[in-house]
């Protein structure tokens, strides 16, 4: 549902609630209508599809999270600006398992739009560090790891950050490095 339709319906419900409370003296129904309008105003700022996607990601059901994110066809018309970052963040987390290289632009967009919670920003930086290290960009990966460590005040990701730093210390293998014993090999031997 378009975000402006939600606000319009909430305004109509508020007017209906005022009418019921003051003109028809149905105070109980007026309060119920006000509560319904409050739910719609809440859904204007926190989209229901993103909330459902967060719920299923917490339950480790990535397929259902992708399903609920798929219901957002045009994020600029369906979401409030404060939710743009979380939309890209969730899409990146859903792609992290199968396609880590496709996750990088989504996490960068999520950080560009802004994430409210420090833990979410720390997770985004940690994922960017993983992609940078896997592509051989160690300095960029180190920078992202430091940023993630600064944002992780609760210490929830210390093990992952430590594992990534250990991975940084390992020597990188070149993509086209050949076996040194194969150099002396002849044409037929």
Image (tube, rainbow, N blue to C red):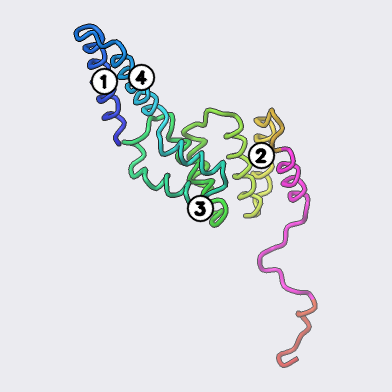
Would you identify the image quadrant in which residue 14 lies?
top left
Give the CA distance from mark 4 to mark 1. Answer: 9 Å
Q: Residues within 10 Å of mark 4 (few under 14, many from 20)?
A: some
Q: Which residue is mark 1?
A: 13
Q: Give the number of the disc on residue 143.
A: 2
Q: Which residue is mark 3?
A: 102
Q: Is residue 98 left or right of residue 87?
A: right
- Work out whether mark 2 precedes mark 1 in sequence or the reverse, and give the earlier one: 1
Instruction: Give the label, 4 or 2, closer to the camera.
Output: 4
Residue 3 percent coordinates (x, y): 31, 31
Magenta segment includes 156 = no
Residue 175 percent coordinates (x, y): 66, 65
- Work out whether mark 1 precedes mark 3 in sequence or the reverse, and give the earlier one: 1
Query: Residue at (52%, 36%) from the top-left corner?
Result: 111
Q: Which residue is mark 4?
A: 35
Tell whether label 3 touches label 1 (CB within 8 Å).
no
The foreground one among 128 and 13 is 13
Give the CA distance from mark 2 to mark 1. Answer: 50 Å
Would you identify the image quadrant in which residue 28 lies?
top left
Query: Residue at (37%, 24%) from the top-left corner?
Result: 39
Instruction: Give the label, 2 or 3, closer to the camera.
Output: 3
- Work out whether mark 4 precedes mark 2 in sequence or the reverse, and give the earlier one: 4
Q: Give the number of the disc on residue 66.
A: none
Residue 123 percent coordinates (x, y): 61, 39
């Amino acid at each position: 549902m378009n975000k402006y339709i939600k606000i319009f319906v909430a305004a109509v419900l508020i007017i209906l609630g005022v009418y019921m409370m003051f003109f028809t003296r149905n105070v109980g129904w007026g309060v119920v209508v006000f509560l319904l309008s409050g739910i719609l105003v809440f859904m204007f700022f926190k989209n229901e599809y993103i909330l459902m996607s967060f719920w299923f990601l917490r339950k480790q059901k990535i397929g259902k999270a992708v399903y609920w994110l798929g219901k957002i066809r045009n994020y600029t018309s369906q979401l409030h600006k404060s939710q743009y970052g979380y939309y890209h963040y969730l899409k990146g987390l859903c792609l992290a398992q199968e396609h880590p290289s496709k996750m990088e632009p989504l996490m960068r967009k999520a950080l560009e739009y802004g994430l409210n919670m420090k833990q979410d920003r720390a997770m985004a930086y940690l994922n960017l560090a993983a992609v940078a290290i896997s592509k051989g960009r160690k300095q960029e990966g180190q920078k992202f790891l430091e940023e993630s460590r600064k944002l992780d005040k609760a210490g929830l990701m210390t093990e992952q950050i430590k594992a990534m730093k250990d991975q940084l210390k390992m020597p990188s293998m070149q993509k086209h490095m050949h076996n040194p014993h194969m150099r002396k090999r002849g044409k037929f031997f």
